[in-house]
Image (spheres, rainbow, N blue to C red):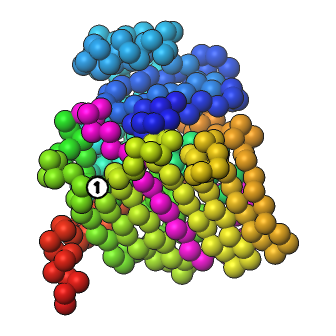
Amino acid sequence: MGKHDGMNYAPQGKPSPVVAAGEFVFAAMALEHGHIYGMCNGLLEAGATLKWVYDPDPAKVEQFRKTYPQVQAASSEQEVLQDAEVKLVAAAAITSERGPLGVKVMKHGKHYFTDKAPFTTLAQLADAKAAVQETGCKYMVYYSERLHVESAVYAGQLIEQGAIGRVVQVLGLGPHRLNAPSRPDWFFRKEQYGGILCDIGSHQIEQFLYYSGNANASVLHSKVGNFNNAEYPELEDFGDASLLGENGAAGYFRVDWLTPDGLGTWGDGRTIILGTKGYIELRKYIDVGRSSSGDHLYLVDGEKEHHLEVSGKVGYPFFGKLILDCLNGTETAMTHQHAFKAAELCLLAQEQAIWIPQEAAASILKL
Protein backbone atom coordinates (compact mmCIF):
# COMPACT_ATOMS: atom_id res chain seq x y z
CA MET A 1 0.00 0.00 0.00
CA GLY A 2 3.03 2.31 0.06
CA LYS A 3 3.01 2.97 3.82
CA HIS A 4 6.22 4.97 3.71
CA ASP A 5 5.53 6.74 0.40
CA GLY A 6 2.34 8.75 -0.01
CA MET A 7 2.73 8.88 -3.78
CA ASN A 8 2.13 5.13 -3.92
CA TYR A 9 -0.52 4.95 -1.21
CA ALA A 10 -3.18 2.62 -2.61
CA PRO A 11 -5.63 1.27 -0.02
CA GLN A 12 -7.20 -2.13 -0.54
CA GLY A 13 -10.61 -2.95 0.90
CA LYS A 14 -13.04 -5.82 0.85
CA PRO A 15 -14.93 -6.57 -2.38
CA SER A 16 -18.37 -4.99 -2.26
CA PRO A 17 -19.68 -5.14 -5.82
CA VAL A 18 -22.67 -3.06 -6.87
CA VAL A 19 -22.70 -4.37 -10.44
CA ALA A 20 -22.12 -7.70 -12.16
CA ALA A 21 -18.90 -8.48 -14.03
CA GLY A 22 -18.76 -6.59 -17.31
CA GLU A 23 -21.66 -4.29 -16.45
CA PHE A 24 -19.44 -1.26 -15.80
CA VAL A 25 -16.24 -1.16 -17.85
CA PHE A 26 -13.51 1.40 -17.22
CA ALA A 27 -10.02 2.24 -18.39
CA ALA A 28 -6.92 3.69 -16.73
CA MET A 29 -4.88 6.38 -18.42
CA ALA A 30 -2.08 8.85 -17.60
CA LEU A 31 -0.16 6.94 -14.93
CA GLU A 32 1.86 9.90 -13.64
CA HIS A 33 0.88 9.47 -9.99
CA GLY A 34 0.65 6.31 -7.92
CA HIS A 35 -2.84 7.27 -6.74
CA ILE A 36 -4.13 5.64 -9.93
CA TYR A 37 -3.69 2.31 -8.14
CA GLY A 38 -5.93 3.36 -5.26
CA MET A 39 -8.52 4.67 -7.72
CA CYS A 40 -8.52 1.38 -9.63
CA ASN A 41 -8.61 -0.71 -6.45
CA GLY A 42 -11.71 1.11 -5.27
CA LEU A 43 -13.53 0.69 -8.58
CA LEU A 44 -12.59 -2.97 -8.92
CA GLU A 45 -13.72 -3.77 -5.38
CA ALA A 46 -17.06 -2.14 -6.23
CA GLY A 47 -17.49 -4.51 -9.18
CA ALA A 48 -16.16 -2.48 -12.12
CA THR A 49 -14.27 -4.23 -14.93
CA LEU A 50 -10.85 -2.83 -15.90
CA LYS A 51 -10.40 -3.29 -19.66
CA TRP A 52 -7.69 -0.92 -20.89
CA VAL A 53 -4.59 0.90 -19.73
CA TYR A 54 -2.78 3.55 -21.71
CA ASP A 55 0.29 5.68 -21.05
CA PRO A 56 2.96 6.82 -23.51
CA ASP A 57 5.61 5.37 -21.18
CA PRO A 58 5.78 1.57 -21.72
CA ALA A 59 7.53 1.11 -18.37
CA LYS A 60 4.57 2.59 -16.50
CA VAL A 61 2.18 0.35 -18.45
CA GLU A 62 4.28 -2.74 -17.72
CA GLN A 63 4.34 -1.94 -14.00
CA PHE A 64 0.59 -1.36 -14.01
CA ARG A 65 -0.06 -4.69 -15.69
CA LYS A 66 1.94 -6.49 -13.01
CA THR A 67 -0.66 -5.30 -10.51
CA TYR A 68 -3.64 -5.80 -12.84
CA PRO A 69 -2.70 -8.64 -15.21
CA GLN A 70 -6.22 -8.79 -16.66
CA VAL A 71 -5.91 -5.36 -18.30
CA GLN A 72 -5.13 -4.85 -22.00
CA ALA A 73 -2.49 -2.33 -23.05
CA ALA A 74 -4.01 0.13 -25.54
CA SER A 75 -1.89 1.27 -28.47
CA SER A 76 -3.09 4.86 -28.19
CA GLU A 77 -5.28 7.23 -26.23
CA GLN A 78 -7.83 7.10 -29.05
CA GLU A 79 -8.19 3.32 -28.76
CA VAL A 80 -9.52 3.86 -25.26
CA LEU A 81 -11.65 6.93 -26.03
CA GLN A 82 -13.31 5.34 -29.05
CA ASP A 83 -14.25 2.10 -27.29
CA ALA A 84 -18.01 2.32 -26.77
CA GLU A 85 -17.86 -0.30 -24.03
CA VAL A 86 -15.79 1.97 -21.76
CA LYS A 87 -18.03 4.03 -19.49
CA LEU A 88 -15.40 5.77 -17.36
CA VAL A 89 -11.74 6.76 -17.63
CA ALA A 90 -9.66 6.96 -14.45
CA ALA A 91 -6.52 9.06 -14.77
CA ALA A 92 -3.68 10.51 -12.70
CA ALA A 93 -2.04 12.85 -15.17
CA ILE A 94 0.44 15.64 -14.42
CA THR A 95 -1.67 18.00 -12.34
CA SER A 96 -1.74 20.80 -14.93
CA GLU A 97 -2.98 18.33 -17.56
CA ARG A 98 -5.83 16.79 -15.57
CA GLY A 99 -8.44 19.37 -16.49
CA PRO A 100 -7.81 19.35 -20.27
CA LEU A 101 -7.72 15.54 -20.31
CA GLY A 102 -11.05 15.42 -18.48
CA VAL A 103 -12.69 17.69 -21.03
CA LYS A 104 -11.40 15.45 -23.84
CA VAL A 105 -12.69 12.31 -22.10
CA MET A 106 -16.14 13.79 -21.49
CA LYS A 107 -16.42 15.01 -25.09
CA HIS A 108 -15.95 11.37 -26.10
CA GLY A 109 -19.05 10.52 -24.04
CA LYS A 110 -17.24 8.97 -21.07
CA HIS A 111 -17.22 9.80 -17.39
CA TYR A 112 -13.93 11.04 -15.95
CA PHE A 113 -12.39 10.19 -12.58
CA THR A 114 -9.23 12.14 -11.81
CA ASP A 115 -6.71 12.21 -9.03
CA LYS A 116 -6.68 15.36 -6.95
CA ALA A 117 -5.93 18.20 -7.44
CA PRO A 118 -8.28 18.33 -10.42
CA PHE A 119 -7.04 21.67 -11.82
CA THR A 120 -4.22 24.17 -11.58
CA THR A 121 -6.11 27.20 -12.95
CA LEU A 122 -9.58 28.68 -12.63
CA ALA A 123 -9.84 28.64 -16.44
CA GLN A 124 -9.49 24.84 -16.40
CA LEU A 125 -12.26 24.65 -13.80
CA ALA A 126 -14.52 26.77 -15.99
CA ASP A 127 -13.81 24.54 -19.00
CA ALA A 128 -14.68 21.42 -17.01
CA LYS A 129 -17.93 22.92 -15.74
CA ALA A 130 -18.89 23.78 -19.31
CA ALA A 131 -18.05 20.27 -20.52
CA VAL A 132 -20.18 18.70 -17.80
CA GLN A 133 -23.14 20.82 -18.90
CA GLU A 134 -22.51 20.08 -22.57
CA THR A 135 -21.98 16.32 -22.31
CA GLY A 136 -23.89 15.23 -19.21
CA CYS A 137 -20.83 13.24 -18.17
CA LYS A 138 -19.28 13.20 -14.73
CA TYR A 139 -16.05 14.88 -13.69
CA MET A 140 -15.26 13.22 -10.36
CA VAL A 141 -12.26 13.75 -8.12
CA TYR A 142 -10.32 11.27 -5.98
CA TYR A 143 -10.14 13.19 -2.70
CA SER A 144 -8.56 10.13 -1.16
CA GLU A 145 -7.84 11.49 2.32
CA ARG A 146 -11.57 11.32 3.02
CA LEU A 147 -12.93 8.87 0.46
CA HIS A 148 -10.31 6.17 0.96
CA VAL A 149 -9.79 6.37 4.74
CA GLU A 150 -12.24 4.38 6.85
CA SER A 151 -11.98 6.60 9.93
CA ALA A 152 -12.77 9.61 7.74
CA VAL A 153 -15.78 7.82 6.25
CA TYR A 154 -17.03 6.86 9.70
CA ALA A 155 -16.58 10.41 11.00
CA GLY A 156 -18.96 11.59 8.29
CA GLN A 157 -21.51 9.00 9.34
CA LEU A 158 -21.25 10.03 13.01
CA ILE A 159 -21.72 13.70 12.15
CA GLU A 160 -24.75 12.87 10.01
CA GLN A 161 -26.21 10.99 12.98
CA GLY A 162 -25.75 14.05 15.19
CA ALA A 163 -23.06 12.52 17.42
CA ILE A 164 -21.29 15.85 18.03
CA GLY A 165 -24.10 18.29 17.26
CA ARG A 166 -23.55 21.18 14.88
CA VAL A 167 -20.02 21.36 13.49
CA VAL A 168 -18.28 24.55 14.56
CA GLN A 169 -14.73 24.04 13.29
CA VAL A 170 -12.71 21.58 11.22
CA LEU A 171 -8.97 21.45 11.86
CA GLY A 172 -6.96 19.48 9.31
CA LEU A 173 -3.31 18.44 9.38
CA GLY A 174 -1.88 16.98 6.17
CA PRO A 175 1.86 16.38 6.54
CA HIS A 176 3.57 14.31 3.84
CA ARG A 177 7.01 12.77 3.41
CA LEU A 178 8.78 14.35 0.44
CA ASN A 179 10.98 11.43 -0.57
CA ALA A 180 12.35 13.66 -3.34
CA PRO A 181 14.35 11.03 -5.29
CA SER A 182 11.12 9.14 -6.03
CA ARG A 183 9.34 12.19 -7.44
CA PRO A 184 9.12 13.03 -11.15
CA ASP A 185 10.57 16.30 -12.43
CA TRP A 186 7.13 17.87 -12.90
CA PHE A 187 6.46 17.56 -9.18
CA PHE A 188 8.96 20.38 -8.56
CA ARG A 189 7.65 22.76 -11.24
CA LYS A 190 4.97 25.01 -9.83
CA GLU A 191 3.23 25.58 -13.17
CA GLN A 192 2.71 21.83 -13.41
CA TYR A 193 1.91 20.83 -9.81
CA GLY A 194 0.02 24.01 -8.94
CA GLY A 195 1.45 24.80 -5.50
CA ILE A 196 1.02 23.06 -2.16
CA LEU A 197 -2.41 24.56 -1.34
CA CYS A 198 -3.71 23.61 -4.77
CA ASP A 199 -2.26 20.11 -4.47
CA ILE A 200 -2.54 18.52 -1.03
CA GLY A 201 -4.53 21.46 0.28
CA SER A 202 -7.40 20.30 -1.92
CA HIS A 203 -7.90 17.31 0.40
CA GLN A 204 -8.24 19.55 3.42
CA ILE A 205 -10.66 22.02 1.85
CA GLU A 206 -12.86 19.20 0.58
CA GLN A 207 -13.02 17.74 4.09
CA PHE A 208 -13.87 21.11 5.61
CA LEU A 209 -16.79 21.58 3.23
CA TYR A 210 -18.01 18.02 3.74
CA TYR A 211 -17.80 17.76 7.52
CA SER A 212 -19.12 21.27 8.15
CA GLY A 213 -22.00 20.88 5.70
CA ASN A 214 -21.03 23.90 3.64
CA ALA A 215 -21.80 24.40 -0.04
CA ASN A 216 -19.67 27.54 -0.11
CA ALA A 217 -16.90 29.22 1.88
CA SER A 218 -14.41 32.07 1.76
CA VAL A 219 -10.63 31.91 2.10
CA LEU A 220 -9.72 34.36 4.87
CA HIS A 221 -5.96 33.90 4.85
CA SER A 222 -3.33 31.63 3.34
CA LYS A 223 0.43 31.45 3.22
CA VAL A 224 3.14 29.23 1.78
CA GLY A 225 6.89 28.85 2.05
CA ASN A 226 9.93 26.72 1.34
CA PHE A 227 11.75 26.16 4.60
CA ASN A 228 13.88 23.08 4.01
CA ASN A 229 14.23 22.43 0.28
CA ALA A 230 16.24 25.25 -1.26
CA GLU A 231 17.52 22.91 -3.98
CA TYR A 232 13.96 22.89 -5.33
CA PRO A 233 13.19 26.62 -5.55
CA GLU A 234 9.69 26.17 -7.02
CA LEU A 235 8.60 23.71 -4.32
CA GLU A 236 6.45 24.91 -1.46
CA ASP A 237 7.08 22.60 1.48
CA PHE A 238 4.70 24.38 3.87
CA GLY A 239 1.27 25.93 3.52
CA ASP A 240 -1.75 26.79 5.63
CA ALA A 241 -5.08 28.51 5.29
CA SER A 242 -8.12 29.70 7.23
CA LEU A 243 -11.64 29.49 5.82
CA LEU A 244 -15.13 30.55 6.84
CA GLY A 245 -18.13 28.60 5.66
CA GLU A 246 -21.41 30.25 4.71
CA ASN A 247 -23.07 28.55 7.70
CA GLY A 248 -20.57 30.07 10.12
CA ALA A 249 -18.29 27.04 10.59
CA ALA A 250 -14.58 27.81 10.60
CA GLY A 251 -11.78 25.83 9.01
CA TYR A 252 -8.03 25.80 9.39
CA PHE A 253 -5.53 23.44 7.80
CA ARG A 254 -1.80 22.94 7.53
CA VAL A 255 -0.06 20.91 4.86
CA ASP A 256 3.65 20.26 4.44
CA TRP A 257 6.41 18.12 2.95
CA LEU A 258 8.35 17.99 6.22
CA THR A 259 7.56 14.53 7.63
CA PRO A 260 10.72 13.25 9.37
CA ASP A 261 12.25 9.90 8.48
CA GLY A 262 11.54 8.55 11.95
CA LEU A 263 7.77 8.43 11.40
CA GLY A 264 6.53 4.94 10.58
CA THR A 265 4.31 6.08 7.72
CA TRP A 266 4.29 8.76 5.00
CA GLY A 267 2.40 11.33 7.05
CA ASP A 268 0.67 11.77 10.38
CA GLY A 269 -2.63 12.90 8.87
CA ARG A 270 -5.12 14.10 11.44
CA THR A 271 -8.49 15.80 11.49
CA ILE A 272 -10.20 17.34 14.52
CA ILE A 273 -13.88 18.19 14.16
CA LEU A 274 -15.40 20.34 16.89
CA GLY A 275 -19.15 20.26 17.39
CA THR A 276 -21.57 21.86 19.82
CA LYS A 277 -22.05 18.53 21.64
CA GLY A 278 -18.66 16.87 21.32
CA TYR A 279 -15.64 16.42 19.12
CA ILE A 280 -13.94 13.85 16.91
CA GLU A 281 -10.26 13.32 16.27
CA LEU A 282 -9.03 11.15 13.40
CA ARG A 283 -5.56 9.66 13.45
CA LYS A 284 -5.70 8.38 9.93
CA TYR A 285 -2.48 6.56 9.17
CA ILE A 286 -0.72 6.01 12.50
CA ASP A 287 -1.23 6.55 16.23
CA VAL A 288 2.20 7.95 17.07
CA GLY A 289 4.08 6.11 19.79
CA ARG A 290 1.13 3.77 20.38
CA SER A 291 0.22 1.83 17.25
CA SER A 292 1.54 1.58 13.69
CA SER A 293 -1.98 0.89 12.45
CA GLY A 294 -4.22 3.61 11.09
CA ASP A 295 -7.91 4.49 11.21
CA HIS A 296 -8.11 5.45 14.87
CA LEU A 297 -11.16 7.54 15.70
CA TYR A 298 -11.48 9.33 19.02
CA LEU A 299 -14.92 10.61 19.99
CA VAL A 300 -15.82 12.61 23.08
CA ASP A 301 -19.55 13.20 23.53
CA GLY A 302 -21.94 14.00 26.35
CA GLU A 303 -21.57 10.54 27.88
CA LYS A 304 -17.91 9.49 27.75
CA GLU A 305 -14.66 9.16 25.81
CA HIS A 306 -14.53 6.65 22.95
CA HIS A 307 -11.58 5.17 21.06
CA LEU A 308 -12.62 3.23 17.97
CA GLU A 309 -10.30 1.28 15.68
CA VAL A 310 -12.32 1.07 12.48
CA SER A 311 -9.86 -0.39 9.97
CA GLY A 312 -11.60 -3.11 7.96
CA LYS A 313 -14.97 -2.33 9.53
CA VAL A 314 -16.41 0.56 7.50
CA GLY A 315 -15.38 0.13 3.88
CA TYR A 316 -15.24 2.67 1.07
CA PRO A 317 -18.78 3.33 -0.17
CA PHE A 318 -17.81 6.16 -2.53
CA PHE A 319 -16.72 3.86 -5.35
CA GLY A 320 -19.90 1.82 -5.53
CA LYS A 321 -21.98 4.98 -5.35
CA LEU A 322 -19.91 6.52 -8.16
CA ILE A 323 -20.51 3.52 -10.41
CA LEU A 324 -24.25 3.65 -9.78
CA ASP A 325 -24.29 7.41 -10.30
CA CYS A 326 -22.66 6.95 -13.70
CA LEU A 327 -25.23 4.33 -14.64
CA ASN A 328 -28.28 6.11 -13.21
CA GLY A 329 -27.49 9.79 -13.71
CA THR A 330 -27.62 10.49 -9.96
CA GLU A 331 -25.24 12.30 -7.59
CA THR A 332 -25.05 10.21 -4.43
CA ALA A 333 -21.27 9.72 -4.25
CA MET A 334 -20.39 13.39 -4.59
CA THR A 335 -22.07 16.29 -6.34
CA HIS A 336 -20.30 18.29 -9.02
CA GLN A 337 -21.06 21.38 -6.98
CA HIS A 338 -19.07 19.98 -4.05
CA ALA A 339 -16.16 18.64 -6.11
CA PHE A 340 -15.83 21.88 -8.05
CA LYS A 341 -16.23 24.17 -5.03
CA ALA A 342 -13.40 22.37 -3.20
CA ALA A 343 -11.26 22.78 -6.32
CA GLU A 344 -12.15 26.47 -6.64
CA LEU A 345 -11.31 27.24 -3.04
CA CYS A 346 -7.93 25.52 -3.16
CA LEU A 347 -7.08 27.53 -6.30
CA LEU A 348 -8.14 30.76 -4.58
CA ALA A 349 -6.15 29.88 -1.45
CA GLN A 350 -3.12 29.27 -3.63
CA GLU A 351 -3.65 32.47 -5.63
CA GLN A 352 -4.04 34.61 -2.49
CA ALA A 353 -1.25 33.00 -0.48
CA ILE A 354 1.42 35.15 1.14
CA TRP A 355 4.90 33.87 0.32
CA ILE A 356 7.02 33.64 3.46
CA PRO A 357 10.67 32.82 2.86
CA GLN A 358 12.68 32.56 6.04
CA GLU A 359 14.28 35.98 5.70
CA ALA A 360 10.87 37.61 5.21
CA ALA A 361 9.54 35.89 8.32
CA ALA A 362 12.47 37.27 10.31
CA SER A 363 11.77 40.80 9.09
CA ILE A 364 8.04 40.51 9.89
CA LEU A 365 8.83 39.47 13.46
CA LYS A 366 10.86 42.68 13.94
CA LEU A 367 7.87 44.89 13.15
* Residue 162 shown in magenta: yes
Residue at x 57%, y 52% (from the top left corner)? 288
Q: Position of residue 355 (x, y in %)?
A: 20, 68
Residue at x 28%, y 42% (from the top left corner)? 95
Q: Please tell me which residue lies in front, 185 or 228.
A: 228
Residue at x 45%, y 11% (from the top left corner)? 66
Q: In this rendering, would 283 be left or right of 67?
A: right
How many marks on residues? 1
Q: Residue type at mark 1?
A: Asp
Q: Position of residue 177 (x, y in %)?
A: 38, 45
Q: In this rendering, would 217 be left or right of 153?
A: left
Q: Residues within 10 Å of mark 1 (few under 14, many from 20)?
A: many
| Viewer can see residue 317 | no
Q: Please tell me which residue lies in front, 325 or 151.
A: 151
Residue that mark 1 sits on: 237
**Which residues are drawn in magenta?**
156-184
Secondary structure category for the residue under label 1: loop
Q: Please tell me which residue lies in front, 1 or 361.
A: 361
* Residue 91 shown in magenta: no
Q: Quadrant of the C terminus?
A: bottom left
Question: In the rendered image of this protein, does residue 85 appear above or below residue 186?
Answer: above
Residue at x 66%, y 74% (from the top left corner)? 275
Q: Position of residue 97 (x, y in %)?
A: 25, 39
Question: In the rendered image of this protein, does residue 134 appear above or below residue 246?
Answer: above
